[in-house]
Amino acid sequence: MVEEIRSSLSQVFVPWLAGLKDIWRVLRNRGPSQFQFWLIALLIGIAAGFAALFFRKGISALQAWIYGAPDVDYLHSFAQGLPWYMLVAIAAGGGLVVGLILDRFTPDGRVRAVADVIEGAALHDGRVEMRAGAASALASLITLSTGGSSGREGPVVHMAGVIATWVSNRINADGITGRDLLGCAVAAAVSASFNAPIAGALFAMEVVLRHFSINAFAPIVVASVAGTVINRLEYGDVTEFTLVTPGALQFYVELPAFLILGLICGMVAVVLMRAIFFAEKVGTNVQERLSVPRWLRPAVSGAILGGIAVWYPHIIGVGYETTVLALTGGLLLGQAVVFTVVKTAAVAITMGGRMGGGVFSPSLMIGALTGLAFGLIATAVLPDVSGTHTLYAFAGMGAVAAAVLGAPISTTLIVFELTGDWQIGLAVMVSVSMSTALASRLVHRSFFLTQLESRNIHCAAGPQAYLLALIRAGAVMRPMGDSRCASLEHCQTLVEEGLCIRASASLEAAMPVFDRAEAAFLPVMMEEGGTEEIIGALYHVDALKAYNRALAATAAEEHR
C-alpha cells in the first residue's frame, strides 16, 4: 500500500519538478518571457515590500529599546526629559557602530543610497553593490535609531536594488530586463515605505530609470501595488499625515503667494543640498588633515548631533512629530524658522559625517516648516483673502521635497498620498513647479544627480553624457594584423608623439584626444609581460559608430 502511494505521488510530482527545472533553465539561459517577467516583478514587489516594512519596524523597535520611548512617533517629546549625557552617548555610540560596519564591509566607508541605484540603472545594467548595500542598510538602520537626522527612503531604495540585483544575477538578465526589475523593486519599496502606490511607481521611472517606458509601466505598477498591500496589511489603509484644518484655497487671489512660496522653497532646497555637500567636503578635509580613521568619522558626527539634540530633540530620526505639528499649525513662527535652520544643519552633519539614511523625509519636514512660516506671515498680512496657514505648510512640504529629489511629478503625488487631501492640488503643483524650476538651475537637477556629478558620473545630462564612459577602446579597436588596421610602423610613430590610448580606457577618454590631435585613429596599448605593446588601433569613425549604436539602443528602450 505504501509503495502504491509513493508511486502515485512520484507520478504527480516528478513531472512538476521537471517542469520547474525546465522553467529555471529557460529563465537563466534566455531570460524571462512577458508572463514570467510579470510574475517575477510581483515576487520582487512582495520581497521589496517586506524589506521596507521590516526596516521601518526595525527602526521603531530599536528606537523604543534604546531611548525607552513608549511611542516612537512622539520621540522628541519623550527625549526632552532624558539626561543630556544620554542623548550624546546614544548618538555617538550609534555613529561608532555605523563607522565600524562601513569600514569593514564597504571599500570607501560610504553609505549606498538612491544615487547609487541611479548609477546602477544607468551604467551597470540595473545592478547595485550587494555587499556594500547590505552593510549600508544596517548602518542606516542604526543611524536612524540612535539620533541620526535623515530619512528611511534612501536605504530602503538601495535594499530594493540589492533584491533586484540578486534576481537579475540568478536569471542572467540583460540590461533592459535588469533595469526594469530594478524599477519594480524600487517602486515596491517606496510604496511600502510611504503607503503611496501611485507615487512609488512614478518615482521608480522618474528618478531611478529616468524615462517612462510603456512596456515597463505595467510590471512596475504590479510591484508597486504589491508593496502597498504589504504596508496596508500591517498599518491599514491610513495616510501618514492627517490634516486637521484643510481649509479653502482662494485660487485667483492666493495663487501668487504660492508662486512666491515655490521660489522660497526652491532656495531652501538648494541651501539644504549645498549644506550637505559642504559638510561632506569639510568632513573629508578634517579627516585627512588630522588623520582621523574613517570608522571614527560617524562617531564624531553622532556626538555633534547628540549635542544639538540636547536643546533640539526635534532633529532625531525622521522627524514625524515635528512634521505633523507643522502641518497642523502647532508651531509658532519663531519655532518654525529655528527648527528649519537646525534641521538643515543636522541633516548636513548626518550626511556629511557618513552616518547613513536618506534626504526625502528630512526635506518633507523642512518643507513643511518653511511653508508654515511663510503661511503664518502671509495670512497675517492679508487675513481677508488667505486660507489657513496649514495650506502653505502642505504646499511647502511638496515644494522642498520635489526640488531636492528632482522629481516634481512623483513628489506631488506622494504628498497627496501621504496626506489624503486632494483639494489643494493646484497650489501644490504651482509651488512644486516653481521650486524645481529654480533649484534645477542651481544644482545638477537634483541632490542625487549632483552627488553623482561630484564623483565624475555624468547622469544629469542624459545618456549622451555617460554612454561614452561605458564603451572600452579595446572593444571597438581594430586588432593588429586586420586588413583594415593601420600598420605597426604608423602606430609606433603616433605612440612616439604621445598619441595613444590604453585598451581599458573608455571612449570618453579617447574623444578629447581625437579632437586635439585631429587624427583618424589612435594606437591601442596593453601591458603584457611588464611592457606596453600595441595591440590595435581605435579609429574615430568606429568610435562614433559605437556611440551612435548605444544612443539608438537607449532610445529604443525608452520608447518600447
Image (cartoon, grey):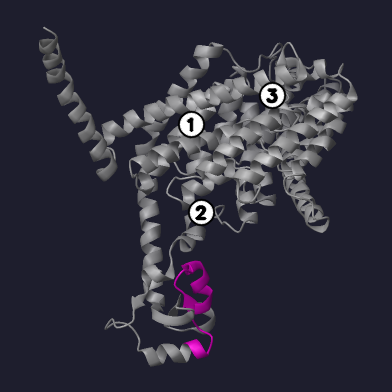
Disc 2 crowd, CA 10 A, few/some/many (<14, 14-19, 20+): few
Q: CA distance from mark 3 to mark 2?
A: 32 Å
Q: Is residue 42 magenta?
A: no
Residue pointed to by mark 1? 187
Residue pointed to by mark 2? 462
Q: Position of residue 185 (x, y in %)?
A: 46, 33
Q: Residue furthest top?
A: 1
Q: Position of residue 520 (x, y in %)?
A: 42, 83
Q: CA distance from mark 1 to mark 3?
A: 24 Å
Q: CA distance from mark 1 to mark 2?
A: 21 Å
The magenta-colored residue range is: 495-514
Q: Are marks 1 and 2 in contact (CB under 8 Å)?
A: no
| Pointer 3 or 2: first along the chain | 3
Callout 2 secondary element: loop
Q: Is residue 459 left or right of residue 451?
A: left
Residue pointed to by mark 3? 394
Callout 1 secondary element: helix
Against 313, residue 298 (above or below) is below
